[in-house]
Image: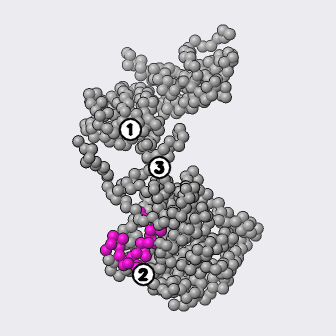
Amino acid sequence: MRLRYPDTIRIIRVPCTGKVDVIHILRAFEKGADGVYVVGCMEGDCRFETGNLRARRRVEHAKTILDAVGIGGDRVKMFNLSSGEGPRFAEYAVEMTDKIKEMGPNPIKRFREKRAA
Amino acid sequence: MSVKTPSKLEKILDSGQLAVTSECGPPRGSDPKAITRKAEMIKDHVDAINITDNQTSVTRLCSLAACIHLKLMGLEPTLQMVVRDRNRIALQSDILGAASFDIHNILCLSGDHQTFGDCPQGQNVFDIDSMQLIQTVRHMRDEGKFLGGDDIARPPQMFVGAAANPFADPFEIRVPRLAKKVAAGVEFIQTQCIYNLDKFELWMKQARDRGLHEKVYILAGVTPFKSAGMAKYMKNRVPGMDVPDEVVKRMAGVPKEKQPEEGLNICVETIQRLKECEGVRGFHIMAIEWEEKVPEIVERSGLYPRPSE
Amino acid sequence: MIVAEKKPIEEIIEMVKAFQKILVVGCNECVTVCEAGGKKEVGILASALRMYFMNQGKKMDIDEITLERQCDHEYLEELRNTIDQYDAVISLACGVGVQFLAEKYFSTHVYPGVNTCFMGVTEERGVWSERCQGCGQCILDRTAGICPISRCAKRLLNGPCGGSTKGKCEISKDLDCAWQLIIDRLRELDRLDEYERIAPLKDWSTERAGGPRKVVREDVRQ
């Protein structure tokens, strides 16, 4: 469709969001990501039946951990859409980017920059 | 049957008369007047007075001390003893303590779990269960020995009782459970308070079918409702309690000021009906925080005056 | 198996915040099955701790390893050459493993990362419940395979008590009354007459009450 969405997003494709585990989300933040969002199929439409449901629970779990360590659980979010919904994909991308911009950079980046210096 | 102990309660039951017992809850403090005052109210209308043992796991003045206060008043106490808080050493020890003051009645109970009380974070003991406590008291009395095997100097002479709940689940083992307690050596039973008379009479029938009514004195428990609220609370919030809808409706059907009177009416009617029930050898009136009504209940039920010593 | 639960991360942070180099050690057995201290949980805890300390501006090295078990010498030996480079170790093993690790590495600070709860079963993924308290004298032959010591809140040997309601324990509607279960099974096995047998006083000397326990098998000792 060649719709526009922010170029600050790095897409990682998975065969099903059920493949995404809590550790993948945490490692992304550990390495300096400002936000992570998981985009899965509409609930009920998962071709592996429960993959996207597991993903949702894992996103919730990651939120709790990120809040507990002071990164902020709002930096991770789950979205659902069907594969044909191009415009919606772009919409979510913009929504997430705007939210993260508002929240500011991942706080651990300051530490990583200091170490590099 | 002949009596095995100096217990006044045993003597009355043995004579074939209906016995009447009641209970007092000790205070949440150390003032003995809180016990003696309640005992004064009921002493001429009952044969023996139970003292509860940290009931619902709420810490109170201990049953043994309260029983001693009653004994010093010249009254007949029944020591309630739960196995929740004491191991077999302490249980035997307290039994001897009671016996040293010539306390002759004991009620062996499990005890409500401590999560209900004021120390839910505390440990519980349950070294032995209530069935085994019955066996222990009989062993101390009849063999004159400690559980460890040594002889007891001046063994306790206690009339051994236990509780029975015809309304707890599962119903099918409630009479086998009574039989078990009889086999363990229990001599008198006080039941949970009765509102479902049909169910109670069914339980009694099953007990009679097994001849249990001739092996143990069964005292029917009754508690007067003070209000419809109390009836509803007991129906819904108290485990092992059976309050039929008709009874709640009857209480709720009268105006608030009349409810205490109706509660007493139901209580007296229950006693009158159960007097006709074969195997019921007496009544245990539990009027917690309403002890002043016990005399009225006893008189209206035709159970006054009580037999003298 | 032994069932444990992850300690809240705030508690763990409090234990180790003064150190600089930490090893998080998991266990591949019981705590993996109850998803509290296996390789996955080690990874998550280590990552979370790294982020926490970075956010605090504190330099903290956190390494990870998961041993097969922490209750046998052979597996703990695997740490022999590397453990001294760490200021402290967080063990996600059950209380047994944490202690054995601490005994073996006497001069290492060792901290527990899980709360050890009980010996129990996996009823379904995410739900574990207690079955055994290790009383040392199994009576399951007499109670139709259901243990009143671990499943009755009052550990009554001649239950049920008067608080049993509709098959549930008086302390919680979510807790089965162990004696109801025993009676149901006795009925199913046509052994309900056994209910009236009076169980004798228990010898608790083989249980915790008798002191810390040991099993010695001379026939297999080397």
- B274 in relation to B242, above or below: below
Camera-side residue of B9 and B300:
B9
- When asked about the image quadrant of residue A4, the answer is top right
Of tags 1 and 3, the one toward the viewer is 3
Relative placement, left or right, of C23 versus A81 is left
Residue C215 at x, y percent in the picture: 30, 49
Residue behind mark 2: B157
**Type of amino acid at the residue the image marks with label 1:** Ala
In the picture, the disc for residue C93 is: 1
Q: In terms of secondary structure, where does tag 3 sit?
A: strand
Camera-side residue of C193 and A73:
C193
Few, some or many residues within 10 Å of mark 3 (<14, 14–19, 20+) = some
Of tags 3 and 2, the one toward the viewer is 3
Residue pictured at 44% horizontal, 47% vertical: C118
Residue C220 at x, y percent in the picture: 27, 44
Residue pictured at 43% horizontal, 28% vertical: C43
Residue B22 seen by the camera: no
Few, some or many residues within 10 Å of mark 2 (<14, 14–19, 20+) = many
Q: In terms of secondary structure, where does tag 2 sit?
A: loop
> Which residue is at the far front?
C190
> Which residue is at the far bottom?
B308
Chain of the residue that carries numbered disc 3 in the rendered image? C
